Every structure is written in C-alpha cells, then in structure tokens.
Image (cartoon, grey):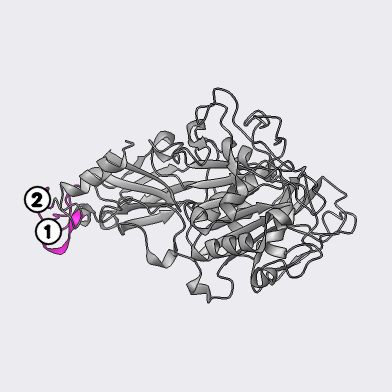
Amino acid sequence: MEIRRLVFASLFAVAGVSGLTACSHHQQEDDGGDVDAPQSPDSCSGLSCFQVDCTSKGLPPTSISGTVFAPNGTLPLYGVNVYVPINDPGPLTDGATCDRCDAGLPGGSLVQIKTDEAGHFQLDDVPATGNVPLVIQIGKWRRQVVVPNVAACQDTSLTTTDTTLPKDHTQGDLPHIAITTGSADALECLVLKLGIDPSEFTNNSAAGHVHLYQNPHTPTDSKGNMNPGQGAIKFKAGWPGGDGALFGDATAMWNDPNALKNYDIVMFSCEGGQYPTTKPQTALQAVHDYADLGGRVFMSHWHNIWVGGEQGNAAHGLADWEQTATFNFSAPQDQENTIASVDESVPKGQSFAQWLVNVGASTTRDQIPITGARYTLPSNNAAMSDRRVYLDQSIAAVNGHVSVQDLEFTTPVTAATDDRCGKVVFSDMHVASGSSSNKTVPFPNGCSTTDLSPQEKALAFIFFDISSCVGQIF
C-alpha cells in the first residue's frame, strides 16, 4: 500500500483538483439495506460521497486501524496524526517554518485522529471505496499510503509495513536534522537506534536527512587550551552515507542563521563543558532566532549555555531564554543513577506517563530509572516552560539535589501563546545510555546496539513530540 509522493499526488490529479470526486460510483439513494450505498451525490463532494451511515443500520463504523511505529518498526508512537485528506497534501516545506496546529492538516481532512498511548488508531467514518488515500504524519515525518479497498461498516486493519514512519526518503518524508557530536553524550546514536537508514546519515556536503557535525577541536580559551570534549569526527570506512567522510564544523552551522534555517531540528550533544568561546553571542542569537522562526532545538547537559548563559559571565547569554529556568552550574554532579519522575501536570504529561508504562520504560507509573543524571537545573519558571521529567525527593533523594531533568518551552518566549512557532528542549541528563562518542572512534562504532533504555525511550517520546506542531489541533 505504500506509495511515493508523486504517485499520491497523481491520485488526486486524475480525480480533480478539489479532491476525489468520483460520485458516479454507486449513485443510487441509500435504501436502508445496502451498506455499500453512499450518500446522495447532491449532498456530497469528493470522498465524502463514499461515507456510509452505518450507525442507523446498527452496524459498526467503516474504519481503518493500525499502530504507528518509529522508523525502527518496534517503538509505538503517541500523538501521530492519521487522516484521510480532502485534497492533495502537497510537498512539505524544508527547513524552519512556523508550524501551528491551528493551521490545520495539509490538504485538509475528511476524517482524522491521533494515535493513543499505545500508538494505536482507529479512524472511523472513512469512505467505503477503493484506493482511499491515508496520511500518517507528525511534524515533518510523513508516510502516505493508499488503501486498495475499504469495505463498508467494518474495520480494515493495516500492517506494520504501512504504518511505520519512513526510514529514508524513498518511503516518505523525514525532517532535516543537524546533530553535533560531543564526548559526554551521543545524541547521534539515539537517532540511529530509532531506525533511520544509514544512508540518511551524512555530513552537510551530502544529501542525507541527518547531517553530523563535529564540535571544534580548536583553542577554547585565552591560554590556548584545546577542547577536550570533542565527539566523533568522521564516519567509519564503508559507511553508506559517506565512506570515512569527515563531519562538518559545528560552529559554521550554529553561527550562521542561513545554515540553521535549512534544518527542521538541530541537536547538540553534551561536550563535557560549556566551551563558551566556541559559542559566541552571535551564535547564541542565531540559534535563538532560528527557534523563533519555527526551528526545533534539542540540547543536552553542558549545552545549558544556550538557555542559562555562560557560567560566571552574565553578559554572555540570551536574556529572555534565561527567564525560563534557574541554573546552578556549580552544583556537584555526584550521582549517576537515580529514579526520575514524570510531571503529569504539563501538556501531554498524562499521556507521556502512560506511554512510558506501555513501552516498558516505567514499571511504576511516573517513574523512570535513569543513568547519567545531572544537576545543573534546579528549577524552571512554570509560567514560561514545562518540566517533563524531574527528581522528586520523596521518591529518590539524590544527595539533596532538586533537579529538572527535561525542560521544554515554545518560542518566541515573549510572544503570546498563539503566536509561538518553535520548540526548545533541554535535557540535563545524558541521553544516549550505553553509547559513546569520541574523536578517535568513527561513527557509529561507539553506538550501543542494545534495545532502547528507559531514558532513551523517554527522550524518544520527546524527540518525536518536538517535531509536532505548536499548540493543540483537536
């Protein structure tokens, strides 16, 4: 059932610009007995001509069902839009865009639903006809399929093949992602474990959807000290996305607003320190403005400089982002393993908690065992940001620490809620449990091949959620 974008577009092209208008099929009036009989052609248009009133017949609705998975085909995903479009959804716009939920779904929707906390959906009242178009989408992740035949007043169940988000561009749409490596975390390994095809991992000179960048191994202070936090700098020999190719320079990307705008998501792996000379005020401002345009920013631990400013230098930072949280850069980082808690009071918090139980990340609701916990973020400003994961002292007294482990806010932070376009996530825990990134080890040789850990699953939820539109759609 899977189809490519041009084939999907041609389905609408042959049926007319305003949608599939094949009302000549079964144009008889509904006689109350034929469940295949559609609505009267005088009262319908396009695919709505094939919607059948099953309720009045005492029958179940005409439906399509399935479970949506991450590209790895094993991790079910919450909050993915599944819908029958009215018109051709058209191509997606590359790069940072203001994706507001209240703008509606591309192509409009005849019927729509979101996947639940088990990744499952049942889309009711779909047209009972052949070649029904279906869109599965969250942010710039999109798969388009055509269901060959949908029988009236019964369910048509889709296979995992049809409901798994695309691994590569031949299967559908993927966001353009930039990832900077660092020696203290390995976000690139988490994204690889989520199932994106190796051919999509390239440097910024190639056409892959995931571009890897190295943090600079250059003098980082006035004494000429080198940055010891450098992560992986090249691909291994024979890598499909670049045989031994070197990664680009992260500073050239995050210093350049035009370079940043090419990406839907940028991700910064912890380097083990802030290294502020590689992140001048011009870079902080460029990333800030990128998020305001609709970009998505995900950063771990010592990339707290982007949100909290430079340790010991109040002049180096972003004043409005600093209002979202309170940092303590000198707090001791003295306990790796702990139990983190989920805040169910924030948007999607209850669904996040239930999803973690469903995927086996939590054996006790609202609790996640984590490694690599860090304590630079004691608290957040609840009026400007949400804490998704935090340390509850009544559950895990971590040497007296109070800490927010995952923080999220929308941008521009000074704009009205309805005028915000971008998202920023800061993780104070190291994400890639079991994986490593080192300048002497080519990617992906430092990546663990074990199943996703509980905290990796938690960050996977946030990773796909950061792709989603800003605001609520329904």
Residue 254, numbered label: none
Q: Position of residue 383 (x, y in %)?
A: 65, 74
User: How many discs mark residues in the rendered view?
Assistant: 2
Residue reaching furthest to the front: 223
Residue reaching furthest to the right: 399
Residue at 15%, 53% in the rendered image: 16
Q: Where 426 falls versus 72 (above or below)?
A: below
- The answer to which quarter of the image holds residue 337 is top right
Is residue 233 at least partly visible in the picture? yes
**Circle 1: element type:** helix
**41 relative position to 432: left or right:** left
**Circle 2: element type:** loop
Is residue 355 at least partly visible in the picture? no
377 or 343, nearer to the observer: 377
450 or 277, nearer to the observer: 277
Residue at 42%, 50% in the rendered image: 137
Q: What crowding class fits label 1: few (fewer than 14 Cα within 10 Å), some (14-19), or many (20 or more)? A: many
Residue reaching furthest to the top: 238
Extent of the magenta region: 23-46
Residue matched to label 2: 24
**12 relative position to 442: left or right:** left
Q: Quadrant of the C terminus?
A: bottom left
- Three-letter code for the amino acid on which mark 2 is drawn: Ser
Residue at 52%, 59% in the rendered image: 257
Q: Position of residue 438 (x, y in %)?
A: 71, 35
**132 relative position to 286: left or right:** left
Q: Do the numbered discs 1 and 2 sit on residues whose CB atoms are within 8 Å?
A: yes
In magenta segment, residue 468: no
Q: Position of residue 292 (x, y in %)?
A: 53, 66
Q: Position of residue 359 (x, y in %)?
A: 61, 42
